[in-house]
Image: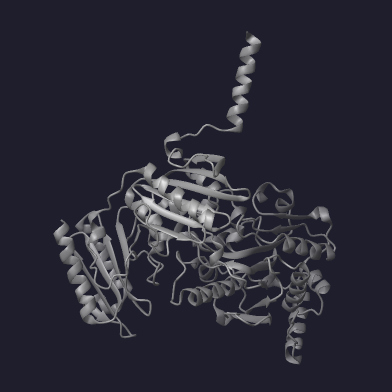
Amino acid sequence: MKQLSIFIFLSLLIAIEAYPMNKDPILMNKLPGSSASLSVQSEKVYETAEELYDYIDGGAELYLNYGFRKLARRIYRFEEENEIKAEIFEMNAPKNAYGVFSYSKDTANTEIGQGAQYLGGSLIFWQGRYFVSIFTREETNKSKEEVLRMGREISEAIGTRGELPAVFNVMPERSLVKGSTFFFHHHAWQNKFRYISNDNIFNIDEHVNALLNQYGNPQKRYYLLLVEYPDRKQVRKAYKKSRKKFSKTLRRKRVGQDEDGLWMGCDTKDRLLMFVIDAPSKEEATYLLDQTGENYTQIK
Amino acid sequence: MTTKKLTRREALKNMALGAAGSLFLGSLPWKAFGNKSAERSKVVLIRDKNLLDGSGNINKGVLQDMLDTAVPTLTGDSDAGSAWEKIIKPDDVVGIKSNHWSRLRTPVALEQLIKERVMGAGVGDDNIGIADKGILNNSIFTNSTALINSRPMRTHDWAGVGSLIKNYILFHPRPSDYHPDTCADLAEVWKKPMVKGKTRLNILVMITPLFHGVGPHHFNEKYTWKYNGLIVGFDPVAVDATGLRIIQARRREFFGEERPISPSPHHIELADTRHNLGNADPANIELVKMGWKEGILI
């Protein structure tokens, strides 16, 4: 009997070593299992910053900054030689899942989840508080089809959709580049579309909602930066600092012209700081400030 | 392999630089240690359109020609053997700090070529190490007297670009200590005792650089291109700054509009202006361009 117990214990130990138990089967179960076309080769859940640093060599800070909670990853064999990797990141809020997506994408060209991009064998999308990436080692018509099918399956498994803060709806739609809104809360990313500053001139941190929006066409781009602060005191401090640091032109004026003849503007409304950069005319800069302010008043 | 023919003036200048170098430590130009000098930093960019075959594999013979042309041009010598003898002494213990990021690593062929040239300078096999991770527990690196730094340039989610300066982050036991302000002060690592004054040569791999990243692993082949180049120099900041200009030019070309690298790779400029590690300003960089010129972007 004793020998049998030892045998069972050792067998269990070997089984656990060969196929470690998932720390979070709920998250892992949102990824497809093996099927006729796919066979799961390995899987793992990552829950700590250290694990993420080891796994995403060089890119973990991005996810940590956007409120990373955990990641489930499966690698599949597809057909004879190909491989597909699926990863689902659970973030602490839908806005942060959107944030990672808006950082990672170039375009939103696919209808999966709440926004998706397929590009060269790589599908990324966000839904609820989840950011999902599916990548095939070799892109073929079949592997592309499979990646998209897996994406739809994961989207169904997630089920619920996430709601973004109201400030995501205040930017005027006229001339807005659809899908260009980039959400962030670290000043390192304020230069994503156009160099603004290497310094934290808007006092951006994890407590603010910062949205950078593109307007116009590729030849004449202009930008609307919105930063929503927790209270009015902080918006006043940021308003004072950013006007002074961004350009002499805005120290005394709401709207002004730079040396290239482009227009900039700055204003606040309640807890919102608004900055217009590179607008083609005074009227457009003024319109963006006025309309954004009005929209913000209406959502309050 | 197309090589640049030296003019008499350049040959004399190179000889003078070589002679000046020989006055220090027997043969080594002092800027080899990665300290900023008042002089301009010499950087050699070499390219060859035949470096990659139709399947994208490296032609080792072409790579060897490139390295053996670029290094003597840097030192002002007429041949690779003499150049490497200036860079490495026979009693050196040499750590070749590579980069093994799985999607775009320092090519094994280049690692081996560097090792062969170090051995050619008289260093025994057992005094040469090639590593990326684990260098703090690698006896060659912990006992090294000389380092050679080589990695591919690529965009990076937090530092802006993976650079030669950044390649030394693993000389610190907690790399994340250098993450604040998107790795602004990476050049600090170069002041650590295990590193300071040991770097003899920097080789930035620009064979298929990554100029943009998508997805969690920041890689898609679509955002690499066959540049077929190496950038070689004693000053890591000058080499990185040169590579960065090429990456930025490629982004302009590809996207058809100004698309800043985000986050800003300001650690390169700050390595110059805040840490005095080398020269980042193109005005302070003497760029020697050799080989294939089409699509050079700089």
- The quarter of the picture where residue A268 lies is bottom left
Q: Residue at x 26, y 59 (%)?
A: A168
In front of the other: B174 or A179: A179
Please identify the quarter of the rendering in which residue A215 is found.
bottom left
Q: Is residue B2 above or below residue A110?
A: below
Residue drawn at x 50%, y 47% as measured from the top left? A86
Query: Residue B147: x and y, percent?
Result: 71, 61
Which image quadrant is residue B197 in? Answer: bottom right
**Could you tell me which residue is drawn at 39 percent across and 59 percent down?**
A110
Q: Position of residue A255 (x, y in %)?
A: 22, 78
Q: Quadrant of the N terminus of chain B?
A: bottom right
Q: A150 or B211, which is in the foreground? A: A150
Return the x and y of residue B81 as percentages of the image width and height: 83, 72
Foreground residue among A32 and B142: A32
In the figure, A132 relative to B32: above or below?
above
Say if residue A45 shows up in the picture: yes
- Residue A278 point in image, percent of width and height: 31, 77
Seen at 78% across and 65% down, the residue is: B88
Q: Quadrant of the C terminus of chain B?
A: bottom right
